[in-house]
Amino acid sequence: MTLPVLHAEDARIAVDDVVAIEQLTVRTRGDRVLCAGDTEVLFAALTGVPLRSRSRLVAEDDMPGEASLIAGSLFVAGHDVGTGDHFGVVGAAPVDVPLPAKMTALEYVRWSARLAGQSPAIARELAMSALEQVGLVGAYKRDVSTLDVAGRRVLALAHAASADPDVIIVELPLAGLEAGPAAFVMNAISRVTEKRKAIFSVRKMDPGTPEGNLALGASDVLVFASGSLVMEATPEELSASVRVYGVTIRKNAGAFRDELEARGAVVRGGPLRMSVTLPEEATTKEILAAASKARAPIVEMFPIVGGSA
């Protein structure tokens, strides 16, 4: 029996002892899992990189820190995230972590392999191979601090691949990139994840965008909103004509769901955090009208696939 890439049973994840994800239960079916929406806490737990390392704009003391599993179970390819056992089979490419100055691309990836337990000679060989795989071998002497955003994302992929892991975890690899740089990163992703299991994240999945194209290659699509899994789907179920919104309300969930379904919307998740798939020709005015009639104040609403909030 093949173990699922991502498997959780009533998983509770806290950030600095404050619960951020509660009762996550999911069992993926295929080898390429795409997580969309509010994924930062989950990926902090999967990669072991604290949230405070993901922003250069906020003082470190003002940012939340480490994410940890405090109840339930969470596994990557059958390996326990709670105990850190999964780090033995996972290569992680977290989004835009700070890079050291005065270190070349080769030195950076070589140290990644060394930290995974490889000898100096083998680590250098693996690092060169990883840089070649992602298209950075020509820049192996370049200072990593001088790389542009796409170059940094690709370097993170080389770091993730350096110890030849079974699973690659790639966080927001295409966020904020234009078509040209995104194509460069997509090519690197394709090579690094070939014959490997993979978990990706995107902010949203508009058709025709780089992130939307990444979703097309997924076997499983998981949508998160405000700390909850609100939708499980396949790329086929998220066709180009579909518009999906993440919605969080404060109360009266049953009446809100009834009102939405009466308007032809498909509601998944809940009770207070959910995804809403609108019928053809409908707009977000239908969501607002349903909330008004049900007396269900909306706390948050954002587009996941298509449209705008």
Image (cartoon, grey):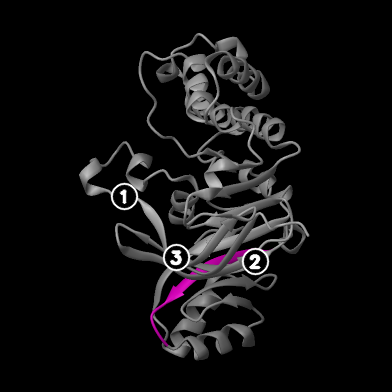
What is the three-letter code of the residue carrying label 3?
Answer: Gly
Residue drawn at (52%, 15%), measured in percent from left and top?
A: 120
- Which residue lies under the disc numbered 2? 232
Of 300 and 224, the residue lying toward us: 224
Measure the C-alpha gap from mark 3 to mark 2.
15 Å
Residue 53 position within the rendered picture, expressed as x and y whole percent measured from the top left: 35, 40
- Which residue lies under the disc numbered 1? 65
Q: Earlier in the sequence, mark 3 or mark 2?
A: 3
Camera sees residue 226: no
Taking the image as shown, residue 179 lies to the left or right of residue 29, namely: left
Residue 133 position within the rendered picture, expressed as x and y whole percent measured from the top left: 67, 23
* Disc 1 versus disc 2: nearer the observer: 1
- Which residue lies under the disc numbered 3? 227
The residue tagged with tag 2: helix, strand or loop? Answer: strand
What is the three-letter code of the residue carrying label 1?
Answer: Gly
Residue 276 position within the rendered picture, expressed as x and y whole percent measured from the top left: 58, 72
Label 3 crowd bin: few (<14), some (14–19), many (20+), radius 10 Å: many
Q: Earlier in the sequence, mark 1 or mark 2?
A: 1
* Disc 1 versus disc 3: nearer the observer: 1
Residue 244 included in the magenta stretch of the image: yes
The residue tagged with tag 1: helix, strand or loop? Answer: loop
Q: In which quadrant will I find the N terminus?
A: bottom right
Question: Mark 3 and 2 residues: CB-CB less than 8 Å, in contact?
Answer: no
Residue drawn at (61%, 62%), measured in percent from left and top?
A: 7
Of 101 and 302, the residue lying toward us: 101
Give the quarter of the image for residue 185: top right
Q: Earlier in the sequence, mark 1 or mark 3?
A: 1
Residue 250 included in the magenta stretch of the image: yes
Relative height, residue 244 to residue 197 (above, below): below
What is the three-letter code of the residue carrying label 2?
Answer: Glu
Measure the C-alpha gap from mark 1 to mark 3.
16 Å
Q: Which residues are magenta?
A: 242-251
